[in-house]
Amino acid sequence: MSEQQFLPRRRFLTHLGQSAVGLSALASTGGLLSSARAAEKGSASRDPSWNEATRNGLDFLARSQSARGQWNTPPYPVAIAALAGTALLCSGSTITQGPYAKYLSRTADYLISKSRSNGLIGDPMETDPRYTYGHGFSMLFLSQVLGEEGLQDRRDDLVDVLNRAIAFCGKAQTPAGGWGYVSGKDQNDYDEGSTTITQVQGLRGCRNAGLAVPSEIIESAKRYIYKCQNDDGGISYSSQQMGTSRPAITAASLAALYNAGDYEGKKVPEMLAYTRRTLYPLVGGDESFGHWHYTYLYYSQVVYRQGDEDWLPFRDRLYTRIANEQNQDGSWEGQINNIYTTACNLIMLQLDLGYLPIFQR
């Protein structure tokens, strides 16, 4: 994100902090979203119901957070905290400014506290037997807050945590180039697509933040994705379980390839065509192909990067569906738990506000 993009955001947040306190600022000023929309260049108008749903969802996440910075919703406590924190970041708040600053700072503290001596961010085999999800999502969240941290000792802590996380990621990668639910050496080098994607996006966030990420880790991951591709253009679940293409894994793989800088790879058009057939119409739900919110969390990123001709009609259908399914308390129901589903939906609803560098076009 350029300095020109940062300045309007910071000025607004300063004004917000002076004119109102806490979450009530959202109601009294029309919310952070209103200024986000005004600041976004070339943004098409947004339906007020989407903004209301977003505001209510953000407030729900803030209310539901514990004083320790986590959300008490097992399983995947670290992954859920990082995803929920990313959803709050998408509003334009930072760890120092804005109505959700306190909650973001707590989240960062919690994730930093989960950094282990070997670089893993998580609780291996204690509360999280699939800890690579949390590790990848944590790298993504912490890399996005690094640039807004003003205290040098705090920045040093973040840099140290992320550098060790990058090193752990490289060591946990399997010889095939993917990642499994745990470090490759702890699970006979088993790998699968969904955890691979979380690592690639987290690593990209770290690289964008100015940290050194060995290029071979990324290149090996790209080769892994291509190895899992089927003749129909879709991606299989694992290099060790080649079979029917999975729409969810294919969408996530495309997002990961874009994060890896591969926009025009030889096989990218085939993957785009596959997801266009299976996902762009926005039909069905979990009963159709499983993990609906995970799928569209990533596919929305893919379509957004295609430009407004594809994005706007898709966005209108997606956002309207999400808003219509919201509960009275601001949450959404779905697989895993309501914090996970709410975080996924909020990231999607705020995607084209353009505040997080990792999601920008």
Image (spheres, grey):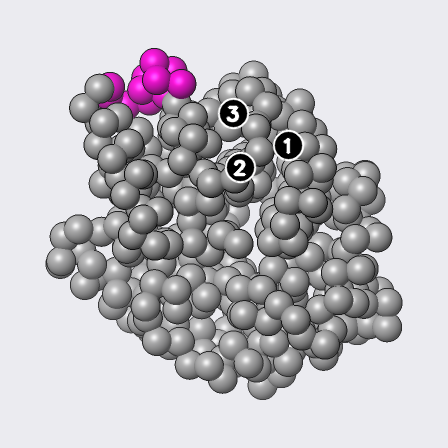
Q: CA distance from mark 3 to mark 2?
A: 14 Å
Tell me which label, 3 or 2, sits earlier in the chain.
2
Q: In this image, 123 relative to 175: left or right?
A: left
Tell me which label, 2 or 1, sits earlier in the chain.
2
Amino acid marked by disc 1: Tyr
- Residue topped by disc 3: 51
- Residue topped by disc 1: 319
Answer few, some or many: residues within 10 Å of disc 2's Cα (few below 14, many 20 plus, some between 14 and 19).
Answer: some
- Please, what secondary structure does the residue beneath circle 2 have? loop
Q: CA distance from mark 2 to mark 1?
A: 15 Å
Q: Residue furthest front?
A: 42
Residue 199 counted in the magenta span: no
- Residue topped by disc 2: 43
Please tell me whether residue 171 is drawn above or below residue 97 in the rendered image. Answer: below
Residue 28 counted in the magenta span: yes
Point out residue 156 in the picture as x, y percentages from the top left corner. Answer: 18, 63
Please tell me whether residue 282 is drawn above or below residue 244 in the rendered image. Answer: above
